[in-house]
Image (cartoon, helix red, strand yellow):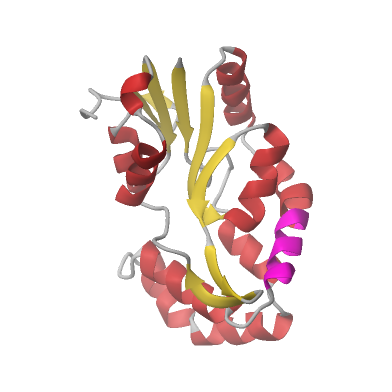
Amino acid sequence: MSLALFDFDGTITTHETMPDFVRQSVSRRRLLLGNLVLAPLVLGYKLGLVSGVLIRRVIVRFAYSGVPLATIESAGQAFARNYLPNALRPEAMERIAWHKAQGHKVVVVSGGLDAYLSPWCNEHGLELICSSLQHSQGVLTGRYLGQQCVLAEKARRVREGHDLSAYSTVYAYGDTPEDRDLLGIATKPHYQWQEVGVPVGR
């Protein structure tokens, strides 16, 4: 049996979707205030001076502290149903369909949030490894639950949940340098839809 690992944003989709989810899932007042307060950090991120890990942590803290869990779950369902279908790469969906037709196990491995990725993956019959938000008594704390599922954490979580030696072939698909660790555990790594290099040992 083979395993196929897919990054989500920019690989399955045409662009990063989490910023759009944030814009659609927080109140207008909080969004406007966040645009003002976080503008310097966002600029620093665009200039390469602020890491993606930091900017996502700060945005999550500002956007979701004190928000009812039910609110983000409802927003995630709507986002998966109404927004994501228009953001998908046809070649990605064709490749996923090919893997499924071959009987391969297909897993989405993403730094995005389970609020919208879980319903989308359930609809398409895919397994999911991703980031989650912490909550207490039905209210979001504004923190991630554990580590963000990015960089080396992607590879660690895959290894944690799957015995890679049990698979004859491990495919991995990514689109940015942040996916290097995920690609490194594959026997057939693909970067921006091109198979690349000699795979790093597992």
In the image, what residue occupies the spot 53% across and 28% down? 106
187 horizontally vs 26: left or right: left
- Percent across and percent down for residue 122 are 68, 40
Quick one: which residue is furthest to the front in this view? 137
Q: Is residue 46 above or below residue 67?
A: above
69 horizontally vs 189: left or right: right
| Residue 60 seen | yes
- Percent across and percent down for residue 103 are 57, 15
Q: Is residue 24 above or below residue 126?
A: below
In the image, what residue occupies the spot 39% across and 63% down? 52
Image quadrant assignment for residue 124: top right
Q: Is residue 60 magenta?
A: no
In the image, what residue occupies the spot 55% across and 86% down? 36
Looking at the rendered image, the quarter that the N terminus falls into is: top left
Image quadrant assignment for residue 22: bottom right
Please tell me which residue lies in front, 19 or 2.
2
Looking at the rendered image, the quarter that the C terminus falls into is: top left
48 horizontally vs 16: left or right: left
In the image, what residue occupies the spot 34% across and 51% down? 153
Please tell me which residue lies in front, 114 or 44.
114
Q: Which residues are magenta?
A: 69-78
| Residue 187 seen | no
- Percent across and percent down for residue 135 are 57, 72
Q: Main secondary structure of the magenta part?
A: helix
